[in-house]
Amino acid sequence: MSPSASYSEINLPSEKLADLRTISLHKLQAGSISEQDLLLQACIEDGFFCLDLTHPRFSPLLSDVDAVFKLSKDLFNYPTDIKTLFDVDKVSDLKTNGYKPKGRNVVAKDGKSDGFESWVLPRNGLLQLTNDPFSHPPAIASNLHSLCGLVQGLSSAAYTIFSSLSTSLALPAGQRFEDFQRLSCPAPDILRLLKYHADANTNCLPQTPHTDMGSLTFVFSTRPGLQVLPVGTGQDLGSYDESDWRYVLPRPGHAVVNIGDCLSIMTNGLLKSALHRVGPVAGYAMPERYSMAYLMRPEDQTMLRALDSPFIPRTVSNGDDVVTSGEWIRKKFKALRGQKDAGNFDQILTGGRGVLA
Ligand SMILES: O=C(O)CCC(=O)C(=O)O
Ligand SMILES: [Fe+2]
């Protein structure tokens, strides 16, 4: 088969596929104990799972996903001079709003740059939770209904997931995950629309390996491309092998969900924040690919330290290294802004490990 064979023609060997658990949001919401246990297991063992949204009650959410994919195509089809009016580095401080052209950031030590355009939208701006500036083009203004529906639907799915995990870990009142991401309070969550460009080079790496630095991420796509590194393959030490990557296949009516660094820190590593990346299937060209990621982050005042739970391993800390989530995000930016050639801001913002050494 030629490197440009269509993805539907590619028959991936099953041992190369990520064997992710499927969690039904409907069953979680109905209080199923076995689903709750399965969710905890997935977060401890993989840091990734597939979220089944096929129950009819989630049809409005899936319609919003479709509408936002359509919007995404319209946005990336805008002429370059319009897109650059909303340059993420000009219209927002912490990259929480605006457009990033392809190739702006370095993704590999050899200096190669990224292979995707992105457009980031802030939850605070969409839901009018703060008065922070939120400049955006007409296509976004005319799709606010779907964008807000999507963000609210995913925030509510996250509430169910957080609350299930909090119960499983016997977290005390006031220290439950959902207490740090309240539905009506401002939080620096972002909706990230992505367009990966086709690339004939079978060795291209459009997006660098990274972990997401927030709490929980939901990803939707209709094309393969997402790859995860199984927990236990030397992620922390960087001693994994290229052959360790596993492909996550998109499934209609499902989101791919993963744990971010903040939840991992708050559970002292019990819940895993796994390395992932986007790239072509080995030996094939990279096809054009649209995806969207809703990257959730704890409210700014959240202390990033291990929570009280009989299941969370304790560490001895003098407290000096505890920071709030807001400080942590700012610190990362400051460190990077002062670091010539660090380039890779978007990945750093969304990921704490596994990026440029
Ligand atoms: O495009 C994807 O499938 C993944 C996106 C991602 O990992 C991110 O935005 O952090
Ligand atoms: Fe990510």
Image (spheres, rainbow, N blue to C red):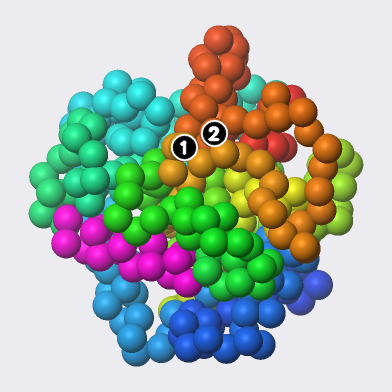
Residue drawn where x is 31% and y is 27% of the image: 92
Local packing at callout 2 (Cα closer than 10 Å; few below 14, some 14-19, many 20+) is some
Residue 354 image-quadrant placement: top right
For the C terminus, the quadrant is top right
Residue 131 drawn above or below residue 176: above
Residues rendered magenta in the picture: 144-160
Tell me which amino acid carries mark 2.
Answer: Thr
* Residue 155 belongs to magenta span: yes
Looking at the picture, how far across and down is residue 314, in whole percent?
81, 48
Tell me which amino acid carries mark 1.
Answer: Gln
Residue 199 seen anywhere in this rendered image of the structure: no
**Mark identifier at residue 324:** 2
For the N terminus, the quadrant is bottom right
Looking at the picture, how far across and down is residue 32, in whole percent?
57, 88
Q: CB under 8 Å between callouts 2 and 1?
A: yes
Q: Earlier in the sequence, mark 2 or mark 1?
A: 1
Residue under label 1: 301
Nearer-the-camera pick, 48 or 248: 48
